[in-house]
Every structure is written in C-alpha cells, then in structure tokens.
C-alpha cells in the first residue's frame, strides 16, 4: 500500500503570538478614561497643528495678494523725486486695500497674522520707496545738469570769436564749472569723479572751438594756439583730440562738397583735407596716425571722385539751362505762329496752340530724362525737329489732307527728317526703337487723328496713336517734299 505523508507541527499556538504589536499600552491598574487620556491629547495636538497650518496658509495667500498690489504702487512711484509725496501716495492706495482684505477675513487669528506681517512688509516697502525716490532725484538732477551744460555749449558754439565774444565764452565756461561743482556737492561725488566731469566739459568747449576755427582763414593755427593756451593735453588726450579735429574738418568739408550745388567749393575742401593730413599738436602728436590716417585718406579720395562728378553735373546743368531757354523760345514761337495773341486768333487755333504747347513741353521733358548726357547741339537739333513735326501736324489739320501740306523747311531739314523717320521705322520693325521715341510717334499719330484701341497691363481698354497708319501717310509726304525742294534748287 502507498505511504500517506504526514506533517509535524513545530510551533505551539498556546505560547507564540504574531509579529505585529501595538504601541499603545494600557496600564491594567488604571481606569479606562485614564488609560485613554494620552490618545485624546495626541488627537488634540494634531488638530491644533493642522489649524495653525491652515490659518497660516490663508494669511500667506492674503499677504501675497497685498504684496502684489503694493509692488504695483511702488512701481508707479518710481519716478517721483519727492520722498514724502511718494510715501503718502503709497499709504493712500495700500491702506484701503489692507482694510478691504481684513474685512473679508472672519477668523481673528488669521487677521492677527495678516496684521503682524503687513506691518513688516510696509516697513520694507517704505524703504524701497525712499531708495526709488532718491534714485529718481539723482536721475532727474543728472538730466537737469546735462541740459544746462548743453545750453551753455550751444551758446558757446554760436558766439563769435571777437573780443566781446571771448568774454562771453569765458563766462559760459565758468558757469558750466559751477553747475558741475554744485551737482558734485549735492550728491557727494568723489573728487576724482568731479575732476573727470570738469575735464569732459573743458574738452567739449575745446572741440566746439575746433568746429568754429576749422573753416576760417588760418584755422589750424588758431586751433593749435588755443590748445596750447588752455593746456589741452591735460584734459583731452591725443586720441580724442584727433577724433574731434577729424569730425570738425569732415563737417566743414561736407558743407563745401554738395554735388550739383553752384556754391560748392571742392578746391577749398581739398585744401582743408590736406591741412588735416599735416596737422600736428603742440606735444608732437600727428593726427594722420593709425585709424585716423585711413579715414583721412578715404575722405581725400572721396572728395577727388566727387569733384569730377560735381563738375560733370554742373556742365550738364549749364547745358540743360541753355537748352531749356532755347527750347522755350522755340515753343513760344511755334504757338505764336499757330495762335498769335496780338492778332485775335480763332478759338480753334487757340485750342490747337494749347494742345501742341502741352505736347511740346512734355516731349522735351521726356527727352531730357532719357538723354541727359547728350550734347547741347544734339538737344537743340531734337527741339527743332520736334517743332517741325508739330507744325506739320497743325498745318495738316488746317488743310484736312496730309498730302496737301505746304512746308517752309529747307532741303536739309526735310531730308534729315525723312532719313530720321526711315531709321526709326527700321528700328521699330526690329523691336529696338527707344521707348521714349516710340511714345513721341504715338503722340504725333494721336494728335493727327490716327488712333487704335489696346489694353493695358490691368486689362483696361485705352486709346493710343496708331504709329504704322500715321507713318504710312507721313513718309510719302516727306518723300514728296524732298523731291519738291530738290527740284526747286
């Protein structure tokens, strides 16, 4: 038979207990109430601790909200230079907020927490307001001092270098020194800071004198004498002296080198830059050194290049003025031929004269824009050719037949016109005709009654002159005129 397994018990249930034990022990000699007293005290202590934490959290949240409002009020007073006014404004705004917050709290202990901490925060905020007020006062005082010094410098720069002017300048320097010393006293500036401010003021006055002397006769010598007389090396180092002198010369040169200005004086500008290049201070410092040497050379090169451009512009302006005077006389003669104001012209002639005058002036303007570098003779030839063409248009209208036009031009003008038109039409066929010239032909065609409708880039219909139709009628007329004038010769 199979063996049945058996188990042997090793523990004794009557003598062994579980491994988990309670920490609460009850003295069997005491009553039940006395035995439970420690448990009640522990529960009470826990409740009080929890209540204190909750109340502190509520108070902290209220204080945080008040602190946020207080910070906004403090920031709003950051530029208030009056300490007393700043603090009063703060109290007037924060106190109602504190009262409002306290009135919304019912718990007496929470209120006391808020009050005790708000007093501490207010003390800190008052201190911040005082600091901000002093910084605002200091900032405004600096601005005020700088404005006063700027005013003195402005007066100094506009005072002439005469005996009376020198006396005024001395007064401006003295007043500026007083302003700086008073500021240093008010804010307890260290002596080295005061001396630096005084040196900076003296340097500004010397640089102002540089700007005045640089454009005058023997200006460089006057600058050297003044620098030596004032012991300029003691308050203006060589580097700053060189930069100030360069800026003074550069400013004066800029006034003399305005391209296209009839009053520009490039020779004088070249003379000034050469003076700057050779300038040497009393202590031996040469301005034409280091980075300034590069700047001076660049300035010199710029003047020479712009001088050529200026001369070209002036030549062009002279040519254009002469041409405009010439073309104006031609245009006036043309319109007077059509509608002489002294012969009581008919309305139709006056209208035609006005239309042709407008077309003439517009065409001349467009031609100048497109041919700025053309010679004076070329421009005059264009004006004569334009007058001839516009007169033809008027006379063609008068006769109502292009082929019957009677011209009074010499064979040279007629043949030139004929060849010019032939050449232009050849360029038009190749797509190489200048746009301005094409526009002139379109205008002539339109004025002569040859129109065609087309669409612009936006798809809108517009009427322009039909150049081909006009030229088909115009060329035979010119050819016939050439033959007539040749036979007449």
Image (cartoon, helix red, strand yellow):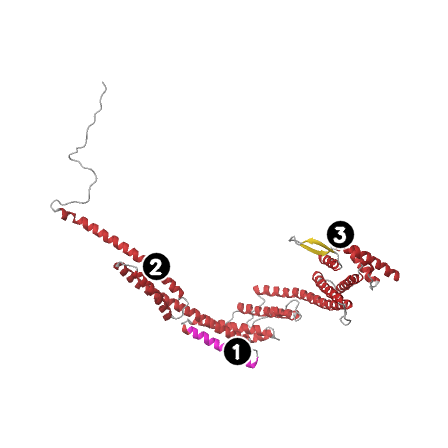
Q: Main secondary structure of the magenta part?
A: helix
Q: Which residue is mark 2?
A: 65
10 w.r.t. 180: above or below: above
As drawn, the label of residue 169 is 1
Q: Residue at x 23, y 53 (%)?
A: 48
Q: Quadrant of the N terminus?
A: top left
Q: Which residue is mark 3?
A: 429
Give me the C-alpha separation between circle 2 and circle 1: 59 Å
Q: Are marks 3 and 1 in contact (CB under 8 Å)?
A: no
Query: Where residue 348 appears, x then y in whole percent?
Result: 75, 65
Q: Residues within 10 Å of mark 3 (few under 14, many from 20)?
A: few
Residue 225 visible (yes or no): yes
Q: Residues within 10 Å of mark 1 (few under 14, many from 20)?
A: many
In the image, 46: left or right of 367? left
Give me the C-alpha separation between circle 3 and circle 1: 76 Å
Q: Residue furthest left?
A: 29
The magenta segment: 162-184
> Does 267 lie within the magenta span?
no
Query: Where residue 146 appears, x then y in whole percent?
Result: 48, 71
């Amino acid at each position: 038979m199979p063996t049945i397994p058996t188990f042997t018990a090793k523990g004794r249930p009557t003598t062994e207990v579980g491994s988990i034990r309670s920490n609460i022990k009850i003295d069997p000699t005491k009553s039940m109430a006395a035995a439970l007293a420690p448990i009640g005290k522990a529960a009470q202590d826990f409740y009080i601790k929890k209540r204190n934490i909750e109340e502190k959290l509520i108070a902290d949240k209220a204080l945080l909200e008040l602190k946020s409002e207080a910070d906004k009020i403090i920031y709003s007073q950051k530029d208030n230079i009056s300490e007393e006014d700043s603090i009063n404004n703060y109290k007037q705004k924060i106190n109602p907020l504190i009262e409002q917050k306290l009135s919304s709290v019912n718990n007496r202990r929470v209120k006391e927490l808020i009050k005790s901490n708000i007093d501490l925060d207010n003390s800190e905020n008052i201190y911040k307001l005082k600091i901000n007020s002093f910084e605002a006062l200091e900032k405004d005082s600096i601005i005020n001092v700088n404005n006063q010094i700027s005013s003195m410098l402005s007066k100094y720069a506009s005072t002439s270098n005469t005996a009376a002017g020198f006396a005024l300048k001395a007064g401006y320097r003295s007043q500026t020194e007083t302003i700086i010393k008073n500021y240093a006293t008010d804010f307890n500036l260290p002596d080295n800071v005061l001396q630096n401010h005084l040196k900076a003021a003296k340097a500004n006055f010397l640089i102002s004198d540089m700007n005045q002397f640089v454009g005058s006769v023997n200006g460089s010598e006057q600058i050297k004498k003044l620098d030596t007389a004032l012991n300029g090396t003691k308050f203006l180092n060589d580097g700053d002296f060189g930069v100030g002198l360069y800026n003074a010369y550069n400013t004066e040169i800029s006034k003399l080198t305005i391209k296209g200005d009839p009053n520009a004086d490039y020779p004088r500008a070249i003379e000034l830059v050469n003076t700057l290049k050779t300038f040497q201070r009393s202590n031996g410092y040469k301005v034409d050194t280091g980075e300034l040497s590069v700047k001076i050379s660049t300035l010199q090169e710029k003047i020479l290049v712009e001088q050529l451009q200026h001369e070209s512009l002036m030549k062009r302006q002279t040519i254009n003025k002469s041409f405009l005077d010439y073309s104006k006389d031609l245009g006036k003669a043309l319109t007077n031929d059509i509608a002489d104001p002294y012969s009581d012209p008919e309305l139709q002639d006056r209208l035609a004269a006005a239309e042709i005058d407008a077309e003439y002036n517009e065409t001349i303007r467009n031609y100048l824009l497109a041919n700025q570098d053309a010679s004076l003779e070329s421009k005059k030839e264009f004006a004569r050719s334009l007058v001839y063409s516009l007169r033809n248009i008027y006379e063609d209208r008068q006769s109502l037949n292009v082929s019957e036009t009677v011209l009074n031009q010499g064979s040279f003008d007629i043949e030139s016109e004929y060849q010019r038109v032939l050449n232009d039409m050849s360029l038009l066929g190749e797509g190489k005709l200048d746009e301005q010239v094409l526009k002139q032909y379109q205008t002539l065609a339109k004025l002569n009654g040859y129109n065609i409708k087309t669409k612009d880039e936006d798809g809108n219909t517009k009427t322009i002159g039909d150049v081909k139709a006009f030229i088909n009628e115009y060329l035979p007329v010119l050819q016939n005129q050439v033959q007539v004038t040749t036979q007449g010769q």
